[in-house]
Image: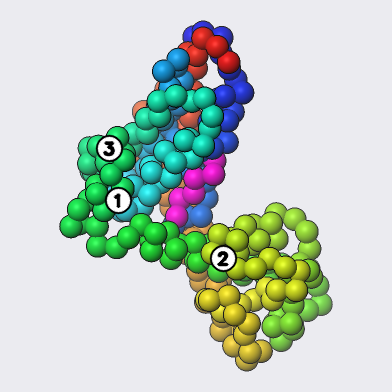
Amino acid sequence: MTAVATSLVDEVLAALATVMDPELDEPITELGFVRSIRLDDTGVTVHLRLPTSFCSPNFAYLMASDAQDALRRVEGLGRIVVQLDDHHDSEKINAGLVADAGYVGTFGVEADTSLDELRSIFLRKAHTAAMERSAARLLRDTDLTVDDLHLITLAQLPEGRTKEALLRRRVAIGLGVDPGEPVVVDEYGGPLEPSAVPLRLRFAKAVRISIEGNSHFCRGLLATRYADAEPGGMSTRVTNLRSTS
């Protein structure tokens, strides 16, 4: 392997780390979905893998097209190729990515909902789960009770990863992040009556547990499918053949 631009590899990995599994609400890099990255003087080729061959085609297409878009934001990469391996619709999805055909252009009449609509649904689920984590942490670490939560604002959340995650997800669905904004809100971001907070939190907890459970399940499936067959286990294989940085 030729000595190459490590920084460009880092930029590629950072770009791919911005791509989220819409249902699991985790980066594809942390889930092990990035199988390999190959850089050469003409461009970059990224192979993705999923826990099963029958993962929903719209999820699969969304992650692959998001990866392609993320790589386009890295300057100086050259030709960008993203390929999804071992999926029952790999051939169709990979052809759609090469043609830049979009979801409807790739699946035609099979695309019964727009990708933007699907993305919006899962972004809102991710926000709901993040809201519940923030509320649960407040109840665990302070003297506050559920009856107090309708008055709690973003300014009252302790700084840290839980709050940062909530703010990111609020931005993703167009909610405000001013310090005076309420933490516990309805599905449209509006404030809640005190009597509605307990039910909202129970729903949010169910969403959060569902996401975390699916994530655990998918990690197990992916490891079962690939861990023994991949030369490097579940890590991402990086090959850098660039002659210049």
Q: Indicate whether 233 appears above or below 21.
A: above
Left or right of residue 128, residue 223 in this image: left
Q: Nearer the viewer, mark 3 or mark 1?
A: 3
Left or right of residue 85, residue 237 in this image: right
Q: Residue at x 40, y 25 (%)?
A: 79
Q: Indicate whether 221 appears above or below 99.
A: below
**Disc 3 marks which amino acid?**
Ala
Q: Secondary structure under badge 3?
A: helix
Q: Quadrant of residue 143?
A: bottom right
In the rendered structure, which disc, 1 or 2, sits on the residue that comes first in sequence? Answer: 1
Q: Secondary structure under badge 1?
A: helix
Residue at which label 1 appears: 103
- The crowding category of the residue bearing disc 1, from other C-alpha atoms within 10 Å (few below 14, some 14 to 19, many at least 20), is many
Q: Residue at x 55, y 73 (%)?
A: 204
**Disc 1 marks which amino acid?**
Tyr
Using the image as rendered, state which of residue 43 and residue 58 is in the foreground.
Answer: 43
**Residue 3 x/y as whole percent:** 56, 9
The label number, if any, that marks residue 174 in the structure image: 2
> Magenta segment range?
17-22
How far is disc 1 from disc 2 in space, using C-alphas?
Answer: 23 Å
Residue at which label 3 appears: 99
Q: Inspect the magenta stretch and tell me whether residue 20 lies in it.
A: yes
Q: Is residue 241 visible?
A: yes
Q: Residue at x 55, y 59 (%)?
A: 172
**Residue 219 x/y as whole percent:** 45, 46
Magenta stretch, main secondary structure, is loop
- The crowding category of the residue bearing disc 2, from other C-alpha atoms within 10 Å (few below 14, some 14 to 19, many at least 20), is few
Q: Secondary structure under badge 2?
A: loop
Q: Inspect the magenta stretch and tell me whether residue 145 lies in it.
A: no
